Each structure stands twice: as C-alpha cells, then as structure tokens.
Amino acid sequence: MVQKIIALWEKEWNGLHTAAYLIAGFTFVAQLLAIVRDRLLAHMFGAGSELDVYYAAFRIPDFLYVAIASLVSISVLIPFLAERLRPENTEEAKRFIRGAFTFFALTIGGGSLLAFFAVPALSNIWVPGFSEAQRDLFVSLTRLLLLSPILLGISSILGSVVQVYRKFFVYAIAPVVYNIGIILGIVLFADSFGMYGVAWGVVLGASLHLLIQLPVFFSHGFSLGFERLSLSELRNVISLALPRTIALSAANLSFISLIAAASFLADGSIAVFTFAFNLQSVPLAIIGVSYSIAAFPTLARLTALGAAKEFAAHVSLAARHILLWSIPVIVLFVVLRAQIVRVTLGSGLFDWTDTRLTAATLALFVISLAAQGIALLLTRAFYAAGKTKIPLFVNVGASSIAAVSGIGGAFFLHTSNMARLFMEDVLRISYVPGSEVVILAAAYAIGQIVAGILLFLFFRRDVPGFSLSLGKSFFQITAASLVMGAVAYYTLIFSAPFLNTDTFLGIFTQGACAGMLGVAAGIAMLVILDNREVREVAGALHRRMRPATIIAPDQEEL
C-alpha cells in the first residue's frame, strides 16, 4: 500500500502541471472568444440601457440552470455512470442516462414553463429599478433565453458520457462553439433584430454546445429516451448533488441581488458590472479553475488510499501555484486596468467614460482573484474528502455577505456625497456618472475573500500541516509582484509622452511594454529569492509534457 501511494504521488506531482496547462489551454481559447463577444457587444451597444436589459435577462434562466441542471451535472453523473459501465454489458449505464434525462426533462420543463408565465411578476424583484420599456424588453428576452438552460442541461448529460469515454477534446471544444454561436448572433442578426438577434445567438450557441457532443454520445449506443430512475437512484443522485446545487444557487442569488441593486443606478451600470466581471473571470478560469480541476482526480484517489500526508501535500502544491499566478495577475490588472479595458472593449459606442468606470470596477473585482482560486481548490478538496457541509455553509454565508454589503453599500454611497467623492478620488473616476456601481464589485470581492479565508482556516484545522509550506511562498510571490507592479506603473508614465494613447495601437503598445517589463522584473525577483514555485514550473516546462487524464470543468452558468 505504501509503495502504491508513493508511486501515485510521484506520478501525479509532475502530472498536475501538465493537466492544469492542458485545461488552461482549452479555457484560454473559450475565454478569448468570450472577450471577442463582449467587444462586439460593447462596440455595437456601448454600456447603456439595452445591454443592461440583455445581461439582466440572463438571471432567471441562469438561476434555473444552476438550480436544476446542476443536479445532472458531469460531476454528479460520472461516478454513477462509471459504476454501471461494464465492457461486457453497457445496458445498465444506458438505462441510467435515460433516467437522468427523464428526471431533468420533467424538472426543467416544469421550471421553465412556470418561469415563462412568472417573468412579468419576477421582474419586480429581479430588476426593480427598470423603466416600463426596459421591463417589457426584459420579459421578452428572458422568455427567449429560457431555451438555453434546457439545451445546456441536455448537453451536460451528453458530456458525462463523452468524458467517461475519454473524448476530452470534444467536451473541451463545446464552450468554444457556444461563444462562436453568440458571436454569429451578434454579427449576423444584431443589426436587423437588435437585442433579439443577440439572444437568438445565445440559443444558437447552446444548440452547438449540445450538437457537437451528439455524435460521440450516439456512437456508443446511448439514447435520450424516457425511463424512470429507481427511488434509491434518485435519492442518491440528489443527495450527492444537493450541497453543490445549494451553494451554486446561493451564489447565483447573491449575483441577482447585486444586479437588482444596479438596476436602480445610472443606465449602463449592469453592463459595466458584467463587463468587468467577465474580464476578471478570464484569469480565474485559466488559473483557479484549471488547477482545482486538475488536482481533483488525484485528491479523490489519495482519499480512497487513506494517504492523508500526500493529500495535504498535493493541495499545498496546487495552492502554491495558484498563488504564483494569481497574485501577479492581481497587481498587473490593477496597474494596467485602463489599458486592459480599452484594448478589449474600447470600440464603437464604448467610450472613455465607459472605460474609466469599467476599469475601476475591474480593479475591485480582481483583488479577490487569489481568494477565489484558493476557494475553488479547497472546495474540491473538501468534496474529494467527502466533506460537503463545510464548503456549503461557507459559500452560502459568503454569498449572503456579498449581497447585503452590496445593497447596503450602494444605498450608502447614494446618500453620502462625501463617501462617494472619496471613493471616486481613490479610484480616479471623479465626476464619472454612475460611479456607485463600483461598490457592487467591492461587495462581491469581500464575499469571495471571506470565503477563501474561512475555507483556508477550516481546511488547515482538518488537515494538519497543510499551511506550513504556503507562508514563505506567499511573501516571496507578493514581494516579486509588488516589484513587477512598480516597474509596470513607471513604464506607463515614462512611455506616455512617446505614444499616442488615443489610438488602439498606442494604448496596446503602452500596456504591452509595461506588462512585459513588469513580468520580467517579477520573474527576476523570484529567481533572486530562489522561489520554489518558479523552479517547479521551469522543471515542468523542461520535461517532456506527457498526456494527462483530465476532467473538463462543468459549465456552471449560461
């Protein structure tokens, strides 16, 4: 047993980076297309009332997807499917998938039908600050977007089969074609049909997400016929999925409350909030999600083997490398926030005022990036150890903190002119209309930081020795990141007189030069400090990258 644990540990220690980099590669492509999607929307509509309605219209379908489709997500279905899949007889697995499809079809069908008729009444809760015209558009777009959770939920069921048969490329490409569908909707239909054309693009993307997996699904003899799950199967599926579903639903409701608060603010506030949130989600998906997903299979196996010491070491390894990438990104995003927003979104109707407000909102979102990555990792580590209650209570509590502080903070800034002027001065957005929206990003960040800290403390309590190797790494990475930020900041200042920053090329060149010089300085500082994580990354890059068995991440939102 000891030799088996050692062999697994030595293999997976090196394989973690390979799997994480593979997942990050696929994620990067999907996120790059998401940036293209947002740039097109910003170009055509700007940060105004139309985009406010469009982004708000996702909230009810997204909540349905989280509350119902997560019950049949890949993380839930794969263990049951693998248990029933036998080389000599796959009928039991096929029957289980048909039963899961039947359960999902009935629940999502009933939920969508109820939501379809309830949208006008729900608009009073979801977007209470909208005008009558905005609410009419909100109702119409929401009803159209209710097709998305149905299509993506079915796609999730297909994805469990695709992953069990190790067709990872097909599953990983699904989010890519999803964004391609939305982009096609914007390019082909937005001019003629406005926001309805964009919404039909979302439905097209969801359809492509499903269709690309159908050939693999059918090729292995599976079908989507109707069949009843046994009571014990249904109970087991729900008991496994429920903690995750509640946590995701709480986070979604928290986000809905922030959107509801933004509906009372200036036109474009929801658009600015969403643009900034999407931008901070890019490094989170590439770093935090990639490492947490890559670590999960090994953590589950180490738990099964009773290898507590190796379990703690593997979580520490992933946590150290999340910090290695996240902390420098936080500093770079804060320093280069205007350049990042202007390059990615600054086109057409998205003007300099929109840029300044989105950049300030992004800076507040991104300060929680490391905490979000650590929280994702530790949540999966708790799941691997069979402890689902702790992340459930922590995430629900943190979501509640974000919702309450966001609504309270927005009201405080609206009533306190002195506090608002102070905040505007600190974030360099003085006299920018709608500046109150930044407090919503700050509230979200506070909730995420609280979640990261609490999960860290609970995990350290339950897994002795976990945090011993993190302190030195944290201080080394932070010191190098501050040096990197200082170099990037002064590069921006010194290069400004020599560049025309009113053009795309000028602002891109300024940001790229500052970023590259800053990164070079940060790496040099880490080398001088003899940083352990840099040595590990260098070793992983110099070794031949071997194929890694990866589990692609679930799609947790529309």
Image (cartoon, grey):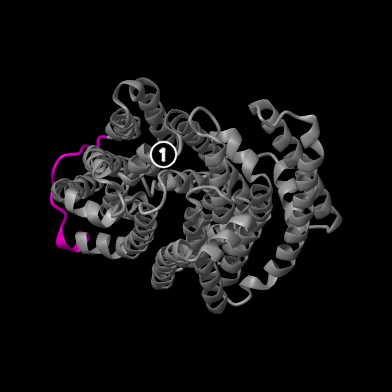
Q: Which residue is mark 1?
A: 48
Q: Is residue 65 above or below residue 515?
A: below
> Could you tell me residue 308's position as x and y percent?
56, 71
Q: Is residue 298 above or below residue 521?
A: below
Mark 1: amino acid: Gly
Instruction: Residue 410: name its quadrant.
Output: bottom left
Report if residue 225 lies within the magenta region: yes
Q: Secondary structure at mark 1?
A: loop
- Within 10 Å of the Cα at label 1, are there few (<14), some (14-19), or many (20+) other Cα atoms? some
Which stretch appears magenta?
Answer: 221-233
Question: What residue appears at the point 43 percent right and 73 percent down from the top-left corner?
Answer: 390
Q: Can the viewer see residue 19?
A: no
Q: Is residue 428 above or below residue 190?
A: below
The answer to whether 254 appears left or right of 500 in the picture is left
Question: What residue appears at the point 16 percent right and 47 percent down from the top-left corner?
Answer: 102
Report if residue 515 lies within the magenta region: no
